Image: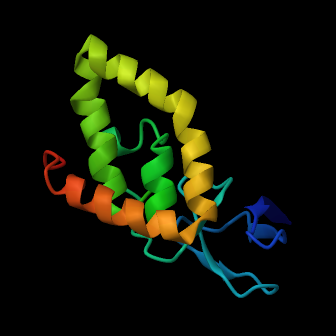
Amino acid sequence: MPHLAGSCDCGRKIHFPKNATIGTQWKCYTCGKVWTLSEHGEKPLHSKGSKAPPTSPQTVTSNNCFVVTATFGTPYAEEVIKYRHFRDKWLNRSFFGRTFIHMYYYVGPVLAEYIKRNPFWRRVMAVILGNLAKFLPKVD
């Protein structure tokens, strides 16, 4: 019996077989998008620009990089992993960093939804966040 994994952007339900492994891909027969099974198995990830699931613990512990993920289209993008690492290893160390994270969790989902729906702002944010990511510390 297939496992309901989520919905495609077009609204069609996506089902993966129970024996599917991480990285297995399926094509939505309604719109043609290709999806990849995520590490948790409950949500499909769009395969465009996606990479293999991260293996280091610090990149898996929390996945709430809303704006960066919306900008780059996948939580496995190199930039998303760098921002997540920066948040987990640097921002969490200080009171001001934790305050910023708390405010970001309040505003981030709204901004991310806006970026997802507006290709112009998605491109603008990709340039800004991509260039800023060059200055972030390397992932261990």
Q: Quadrant of the N terminus?
A: bottom right
Tally of numbered discs: 0
Q: Is residue 124 visible?
A: yes
The color scheme shown is rainbow
| Residue 51 picture quarter | bottom left
Residue at the image point whose x is 54% and y is 33% from the top: 107
| Residue 60 picture quarter | top left
Q: Nearer the viewer, residue 67 or 50?
A: 67
Judge left or right: residue 6 versus residue 79: right
Image coordinates for residue 54, horizontal then vertical, percent: 36, 55
Residue at the image point whose x is 31% and y is 39% from the top: 58
Judge left or right: residue 3 versus residue 132: right
Q: Is residue 55 visible?
A: no
Q: Is residue 93 above or below residue 23?
A: above
Judge left or right: residue 51 versus residue 112: left
Q: Nearer the viewer, residue 59 or 70?
A: 70
Q: Nearer the viewer, residue 76 or 115?
A: 115
Image coordinates for residue 70, horizontal then vertical, percent: 51, 57
Q: Is residue 15 above or below residue 83?
A: below
Judge left or right: residue 99 versus residue 36: left
| Residue 125 picture quarter | bottom left
Image coordinates for residue 36, horizontal then vertical, percent: 58, 71
Residue at the image point whose x is 61% and y is 53% from the top: 114
Q: Nearer the viewer, residue 120 or 136?
A: 120
Q: Quadrant of the C terminus?
A: top left
**Extreme residue toward the top, this view:** 95
Image coordinates for residue 65, horizontal then vertical, percent: 45, 44
